[in-house]
Image (tube, grey):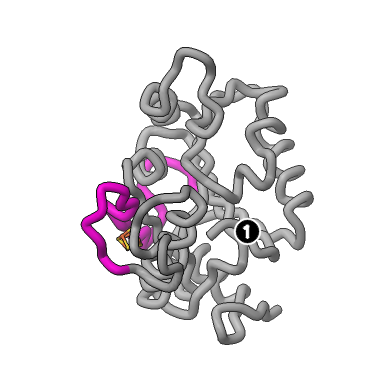
Amino acid sequence: MNFGGYGVIMNIEKAIVALKYNGYSVMLFKTVEEAAKYLDSSINDESVGFGDSDTLLHMNMFQRLSSHNRVVDPAHCVLGKTFKDTALECLTTNIFLTSVNAMSETGELVNIDGTGNRIAGSLFGHQKVYFVVGTNKLTPTLEEAIWRARNIAAPRNAMRLGLRTPCAIKGDRCYNCSSPDRICNSIITYYKKMSGMDMEIVIINEELGF
Ligand code: SF4
């Protein structure tokens, strides 16, 4: 099965084989609704933390999972708790959900982070991490995944957040800025599944997030 995007034809089956070889469990869904139902039925009576993710916001996963799990999400801070309080709590949950900024057909994932809560939560401390990823984030190679994260995902996120960065103002690419609003302070490549915890990639054949 091939999916269009990124200016070339992507091969999702090649990516799934490579991701499984790299130690991940992988599920593929045609729609957001199917993927959301799957996550909702898979995660029950757990403590769940979120990394910043426009994809998960779009899927209403906080609302869905909150009805039968204890969920903490920096995008939904409870009264009296700051972003930092909530993000810290997310680091110690059994389950952690986030997305990635790019995923290569060769089986690598790439994430950029400004505060580090998303990257930190995805690397250590949980029983299981889920990466929920739209096929718009698929690239042929790791090099193109890193390029995508820097020049497509980060600028679009900066625009969404209304930041005063050159990428958000011009809307075309990364300028490797020194802006106080810079959101690209760290970039991580996941070459393979981290040791000591389960990691599952939920791929959705829709355009989701940045
Ligand atoms: S480094 Fe600066 S210009 Fe580049 S994407 Fe990040 S915020 Fe935008």
What is the chief secondary structure element of the magenta stretch? loop
User: In the rendered structure, which amino acid carries the disc numbered 1?
Assistant: Leu
Judge whether 119 appears above or below 142 on screen: above
State left or right for residue 177 relative to residue 20.
left
- Which residues make up the magenta segment? 175-199
Residue at 47% across, 27% down: 93
Judge whether 109 appears above or below 38 on screen: below
The image shows residue 53 at horizontal and vertical percentages of 53, 46
Residue at 50% across, 75% down: 139
| Neighbours of disc 1 within 10 Å: few (<14), some (14-19), many (20+) | many
Q: Which residue is mark 1?
A: 208
The image shows residue 7 at horizontal and vertical percentages of 56, 85
Can residue 26 be seen by looking at this rendering?
no
The image shows residue 107 at horizontal and vertical percentages of 46, 68
Closest to the observer, 168 or 94: 168
Residue at 57% across, 25% down: 71
In magenta segment, residue 187: yes
Judge whether 146 appears above or below 53 on screen: below
Can residue 18 be seen by looking at this rendering?
yes
The quarter of the image holding the N terminus is bottom right
The image shows residue 73 at horizontal and vertical percentages of 52, 30
Q: Secondary structure at mark 1?
A: loop
Residue at 47% across, 48% down: 161
Residue found at the very far top of the displayed protein: 80
Closest to the observer, 77 or 44: 77
Residue found at the very far left of the displayed protein: 178
Residue found at the very far bottom of the displayed protein: 8
- The quadrant where ligand 1 appears is bottom left
In magenta segment, residue 174: no
Closest to the observer, 106 or 87: 87
State left or right for residue 131 relative to residue 205.
left
